Every structure is written in C-alpha cells, then in structure tokens.
Image: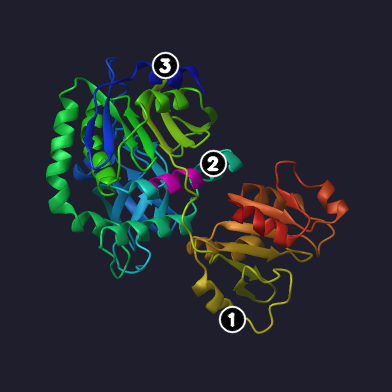
Amino acid sequence: MGSDIRSFVDSLRAADPVVVDGIAFYPLLHDAPDGPSVILLEDSIARGLLEVRETGRVNELEAHNSSAETVLLLEGDIVQGGRQNRVINTTLAVGPHAVVKIPASCVERGRWAGDAKHFTQSGFMVSPSVKASLKRSVHDSVVMTLGKSHASDQSAVWENTSTSLNETQSMNRTEDHLEAYRAKAVDLDKQVADVCAAMFRAGAVAGVAVVRADKRAAVEAFGTKSIAAKVLPRIVRAHLLAPAKGKTEDAPSKFLEDVREATSTSVAGAGGVGEELRLSRARMKGLAFVLDAVTLHLSADWSDEAPARRDHTQTVIMRRPSFAVAPEAQDAGKASEGKPSFADALARATPTDIAVVTLKEGMDAAKLEAKLAPLRERGCTACVINLANVKAVDRALLDYVRALPRVAIAAAGPEVRATLPPELRVFDSVDDAVRSFRAP
C-alpha cells in the first residue's frame, strides 16, 4: 500500500461507539487539515454545475461537468432517473469542464423504460450486502483489467437488492432498491439523527468504523471533514436498514489494521483524475481514492458470505449470418440451428451474458465492432473470441480486441496463438473461456 494511504489510516482515531440494533458505529477522528477542494455530486447537480446523463447502456452513465469545480462521485451512491435507477460502481472525480463515463450497475431490475435523460442523486446508498457484493466484483474487474473495466457482477447486485427489499417488506414491481428506504423512513429518520448527533459530539469526525453482530464490518473515511458530515448520515442509514442480532465483539483497531496491511493495486482514477487503489486482505475488499496526494475517500467492507445469485447467466452465440442465445450449460461451440433470430437474441441479452464471437477468415475490426456494439447497448460487455476457424489475425483486429474491457480468447491454433499479445487471456476451449468469467 502507498505511504499516503498508510499515513491516512494511522492518523484515524476511533472514539467510543454508538450502538444500535447490534451495530456499533465508531466515529473516526482526524485532526489533519482538509484535503483539496471538491464538491459532492448532489451539490453539483443542485447548483446546475454537472449533469448525469443516460447512455442507454446499463453499466455506464455519463457525467458532464460545465463548471470549474472538481466533483466527487462516491461508490455505492444511488442515482435516480434515466431508464432505471443505478448505483455508482466506484469513487471517482470529474475534473473541470470534463465529460466522463461513470461505471454503474442497475438497482431497479424491473424497469427499462421512460424518456428521462438525466439522473439526480437520490440521497441514499445501497444496503451493506449490495455494497459488499458490488465492491468484491468490481475489485476483481479492476485488478484483472488493470483499471480498464469497473464492471460489477450485475446478477449478485440484483440478488442482494431483492434480499434487502424482502427483508424490509418493500418488494415492488420494478424491484427498486429505493423502496426499501421509503418503507422504513419513519423508523429510520430519528435513529439516523440520534446516531449522527452522538458521533459528531466526539470531535473532528472524518469517518466511521461499523462493526456488526452479523460479522460484517465496514470502514468509511474522508480526507475532507465537510464531506464526511454530509455523507455519514446515509452510511448510517444504510446499515440501520439491515439490523444485526446479538452483540458486537471486534474492536475497530482490528479493521483499521487490515486496511493498513492490505495489498493494493494502483490504477488511474475512473474519471481520468486522481488515483484509485484497490485493497485486499483476507475477508476485506476496499478502495482508496487519492487526489493531489491526499486520500479523499477510503472505503472497505468485510464479509464471509459469497454474493447471493441465481445461476442464470447465458451465453450469446454469434454466428454468420445470425447469432442466437443459448443457456450457458449448453456447448457454446455447437451450431445454433433452431435458436432465436438475431433480433430475438439481442432483445434477450442482459448485462450478465457473455458474448461468444466466432471469427471467420476476413473478419476485420469494423465488422467485429458492428456485432458487439448492439450488445454493449444492452450492457453485455463480457466477450469470448473464438479463433478456431482462422489461420491468422490481422494486427488492427488484434489491437481492437486488446482494447475490449472484458475479453478472453479461445481455441486458437498454435500458429495463431504465437502471434497473440501476452496480456490477452487465452484458453484451449470456448467452454473454458466462458467459465473464466463465471469463476467466483
């Protein structure tokens, strides 16, 4: 881990906890001067400085900053509007007068409709179970692609969202995560206010360590205390949404030590500004966002559970002149006679699908892009390139494949394999390549 992050962790001091419903909230105090000047997403939208726009792709939104300010977007925040509500996959900053792609996931599975082009900050974060599954799967994407992809396991996000809705008796037609907060608003409002008032009496609060009786835990800390004051209430609310039975046992120092000693992978910030570090140690996955050598946001989650999910991933099999959708359990290398038409298959494609593209001789980058573009519009970004039927691949096509965010190569013959760039993931069969995206 970088010395800046370690120094930031060492500077945090845990005060006495506020305990509610089996959850201990330890205020984290930080006496150092505040970091660089940034504004939060909700403030930038309210002031008309930044717009979050729909792209038509489930896993990507777009931020347009028309101001001279740097705007901070936080992992786990829910944005509301567009064709469906989304959660932001990672913390990032949008620089002055910049247009930035925002990696996102869906938290409203039953809606893909409406004419709304823009989003607002909902004022809520996803629940602890959704946050933990999001962080784990995005961590794996970032580490595997060295920051080229911040894709989540959308299926796990959906399943944990459904669990939160069921636990709060707020399941609804579109499975909108925000309904969980609306259903519990009367119960939570006073609890959140009381917990936050008690925490801020401890002093210069820059974050919170959350220790739960259900063995989950979280650390959230900020390099600017004014940001902490605005964000901590929604962090507290998210944890109170899911009460834990029993008594908490672990001290916050244990979790801060985990963060301090974590291994880290450093990549450029997703917004093109700052540095993102992905942290890992045993049960913990975390991230740190650094701007101008100051840690602006540190977030870590601990969980023993594998992400909840149903095994309904499909493989999109693309052929010439058409392609079809088949269950992943079927042999992805078999012919697709009797399968749905191109239009039917495309209509069924989802962000949890894997596109398997069988290249033919003469395929070039433009033709491959024409096949993949409509799938990206549906949020399907994982791609297996089957090279069983080609004897050579031109350099321009290889450059295009290398730039794909989530790609694996399958069934290349010895001569073709010898020409492949070493950074590409290469498998002996299509099935092995598909399974590489499905590995837990």
Looking at the picture, how far across and down is residue 100, in whole percent?
A: 41, 44
- Residue 7 image label: 3
* Alpha carbons under labels 2 and 3: distance apart: 24 Å
Element at label 2: helix
Secondary structure predominantly adopted by residues drawn in magenta: helix
Q: Which residues are magenta?
A: 131-137
- Quick check: marks 1 and 2 in contact, CB under 8 Å? no
Image vertical order of residue 428 relative to residue 318, above or below: above
Q: Residue at x 26, y 33 (%)?
A: 25
What amino acid is at disc 1?
A: Pro
Indicate left or right for 195 with 432 as reference.
left
The question of residue 88 being in magenta is answered with no
Q: Residue furthest bottom?
A: 338
Dot 1: few (<14), some (14–19), or many (≥20) neighbours within 10 Å?
some
Q: CA distance from mark 3 to mark 1?
A: 57 Å
Instruction: Give, as a three-letter code, the residue at label 3.
Output: Ser
Disc ID at residue 340: 1
Residue 335 spot, x, y in % from top left:
73, 76
Give the image location of residue 308, x and y in percent.
Answer: 46, 56
Amino acid carrying mark 2 in the image:
Val
Q: Nearer the viewer, residue 124 or 52?
A: 124
Cα separation between marks 1 and 2: 34 Å
Disc 3 or disc 1, which is closer to the eye? 3
Residue at 42% across / 54% down in the picture? 105
* Mark closest to the chain's N terminus, 3 or 1: 3
Relative placement, left or right, of 412 versus 370 is right
Vertical relation: 82 (above or below) 305: below
Q: In which image quadrant can residue 172 be found? A: bottom left
